[in-house]
Amino acid sequence: MSSTEIRPLTRTDGTQKMLADLLIGTVAAGGSVSFMHPLVPEMAAAFWNRSLQAAARGERAVLGAWNGEALVGTVTLLLDCPPNQPHRAEIAKLMTRLDYRGKGIATRLMEAAEAVAVEKGRTLLVLDTAKEEGASGLYEKLGFTLVGEIPDYALKPHGGLTGTLIYWKCVGRTR
């Protein structure tokens, strides 16, 4: 989707509301992104408020995919790692609006997150995804290596346990 623009997000009321709506929709559709259904707007807004404050402090990068004035996807790059891991970053909260899925937006968000990681001097990316209905196929297509599965790691948004798959990828250097 060539008209989609990927850019860092900042804390504005409009952006925070769109992020909250995206999170609520993702959870309602069964997306395993740390929240349970039904997710109330106040909880979603509070999460994004904290996340965007952390981004303003440089502890993370929150990227958004825009189609005109509509926020259609997001991904977060966690940069605030322990002192013995300054080379590492973690991918979190990759979400695409349901009506925009299958159009390459998640791929573009992941490529942008990887570029930010390299720009910040990070050489290792890690992430996890739900075993059931997660994005493992996308991550493998993008060159991430599966480490393994932790069974019964988290509750699915509508109940029941799911395992999580752990991935890594070297970036910005050859291994």
Image: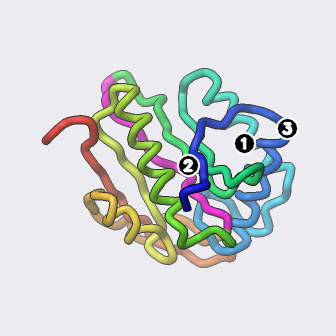
Q: Residues within 10 Å of mark 1 (few under 14, many from 20)?
A: many
> Considering the image in quadrants, where does the N terminus appear?
bottom right
Q: Is the stretch drawn in magenta largely helix, strand or loop?
A: strand
Q: Is residue 86 magenta?
A: yes
Q: Position of residue 88 (x, y in %)?
A: 34, 35
Q: Nearer the viewer, residue 7 or 98?
A: 7
> Considering the image in quadrants, where does the C terminus appear?
top left
Q: Position of residue 112 (x, y in %)?
A: 46, 44
Q: Earlier in the sequence, mark 3 or mark 2?
A: 3
Q: Residue at x 72, y 44 (%)?
A: 47
Give me the C-alpha separation between circle 3 and circle 2: 19 Å
Examine the rendered structure and indicate whether residue 147 appears above or below residue 168: below
Examine the rendered structure and indicate whether residue 27 appears above or below residue 80: below
Which scheme is used to colour this image of the protein?
Answer: rainbow
Judging by the rendered image, the residue that carries numbered circle 1 is 48
Which numbered disc covers residue 13? 3
Helix, strand or loop for disc 2: strand
Q: Amino acid at mark 1?
A: Trp
Which numbered disc covers residue 75? 2
**Disc 1 versus disc 3: nearer the observer:** 3
Q: Are marks 1 and 3 in contact (CB under 8 Å)?
A: no
Examine the rendered structure and indicate whether residue 65 appears above or below residue 51: below
The part of the chain drawn in magenta is: 84-97
From the viewer's perspective, tell me whether residue 153 is left or right of residue 20.
left
Identify the image quadrant of residue 156: bottom right
Give the residue furthest to the front. 3
Q: Residue at x 77, y 42 (%)?
A: 15
Q: Position of residue 142 (x, y in %)?
A: 33, 59
